[in-house]
Image (cartoon, helix red, strand yellow):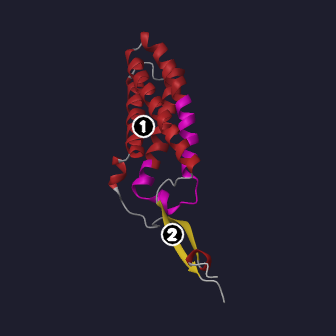
Amino acid sequence: MDQGFPGQHTTTTVTTTTTTTQPTIRFDPSYMRTVPGILKVAQVAFNLLGFICITVSSHSNSSRGGWFNTVAMGGFWFTGILLVFYLFHIVEKFSKIPWLKIEFIFCTIWSAFYLLAASLAADHARYIEAFGVAAFFGFCAMVVYGYDAWIKFRAARSGALAQGQFTPKQVSTVTSPAF
């Protein structure tokens, strides 16, 4: 009794995923046209604009102004350095570091910090107009950091890479029974 093709041959398809990263440091301005790149540029801009507003006011040495400037400069430097890391693919070179988790934690904390700093500046805006403008930039930064935290959370949860890509590769093998 001849069983035919299905009984005599077994086809096995295995899909493997490889991580493709390029360990070379290179400048890539196209990152700034991606959503994470646009968010980082906006964060740097809001940090700097809020800092300038508080600094030029007559009450920049108050505790509210000091707290706002601490938050703004902390965000400016951390986000600015990350932006440079992504532009030069340093993140891709050091792909073993959990960049997405680090960014998620930072963006979450900075959203909360900006909620507090912008609220304190807005409360002081009735006395000093520059604090009101700084509060506006602070609330904008809070929203952008919050949205970035959400994106990083989803990416980290799905196992995505911060920079680089996964390349699926399918391998099919056909085996014949031994007679």
Amino acid type, mark 1: Gln
Residue 137, given in percent of the width and then of the height, sits at: 40, 26
Q: Is residue 15 above or below residue 10?
A: above
The residue under the point 58% across, 41% down is 105
Q: Badge 1 is on which residue?
A: 43
Q: Nearer the viewer, residue 35 or 42?
A: 35
Amino acid type, mark 2: Gln
Please tell me in which quadrant of the rendered image residue 116 appears.
Answer: top right
The residue under the point 56% across, 29% down is 112
Residue 128 visible within the image: yes
Q: Is residue 20 magenta?
A: no
The residue under the point 46% across, 48% down is 81
Dominant secondary structure of the residues highlighted in magenta in the image: helix
Residue 62 visible within the image: no
Q: Badge 2 is on which residue?
A: 170
Please tell me in which quadrant of the rendered image residue 135 appears.
Answer: top left
Where are the magenta residues, as a range?
A: 83-112
Q: Residues within 10 Å of mark 2 (few under 14, many from 20)?
A: few
Q: Is residue 75 above or below residue 12?
A: above
